[in-house]
Image (cartoon, rainbow, N blue to C red):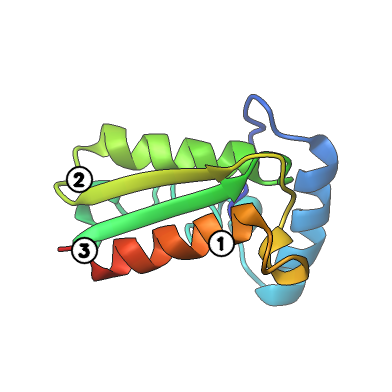
Amino acid sequence: MFCGKTPIDGEYAETRELIEKLWFLVCPGTEAGLDDPRLNPMAEGAPSLQKLGCRKLLVSSAEKDISLARAAAYYQAVVASGWPGMVEWLESKGEEHVFFLDKPDCDESVALMDMVVTFLASD
């Protein structure tokens, strides 16, 4: 999950408010708040996305997920960074946050699992 102090297009204010409350429970004492690089890898001063320590990256979200806008922004930022690895995006249509836990056998859950398996098995 991602967030940040500055709102982005498509992001709900309620989502940012909820994550802000939760983040201080997860990381009490963080001085950067919502711009902590662990929560906002695109924040000023965060490590360069161009230096990600992996060869491939799969970013996924659901069409009705409260964090869709941030996930999509992260994917775009990685692509724009010039990172030399393979990055892919998957958006599960018509679904909400963590839909695959409640509906593991639905078409979108199966498609997500197939994508993850294929992605991990690829070179």
Q: Which residue is mark 2?
A: 83
Q: Nearer the viewer, residue 58 or 44?
A: 58
Q: Position of residue 78 (x, y in %)?
A: 33, 42
* 113 sits to left or right of 107: left
The crowd level at tag 3 (other Cα within 10 Å; few <14, some 14-19, many 20+) is: few
As rendered, which of 22 and 66 lies closer to the eye? 66
Hey, what amino acid is under mark 1? Val
Secondary structure under tag 3 reads loop
On residue 122, which mark appears? 3
Question: In terms of sequence position, does the residue under pointer 1 or pointer 3 come before the other?
Answer: 1
The image shows residue 121, relative to residue 50, as above or below, that is below
- The label on residue 12 is none
Are there few (<14), some (14-19), or many (20+) residues within 10 Å of tag 1? some
Residue that mark 1 sits on: 110
Q: Position of residue 64 (x, y in %)?
A: 73, 41
The residue shown at (75%, 45%) is: 16
The answer for how far apart the CA atoms under marks 2 and 1 are is 29 Å
Q: Nearer the viewer, mark 2 or mark 1?
A: 1
Q: Quick one: SS at disc 1?
A: helix
Q: Amino acid at mark 2?
A: Trp
**Separation of disc 1 and disc 3 at Cα?**
18 Å
Quarter of the figure that contains the C terminus: bottom left
* Point 72% across, 59% down: residue: 99
Q: Is residue 44 visible?
A: no
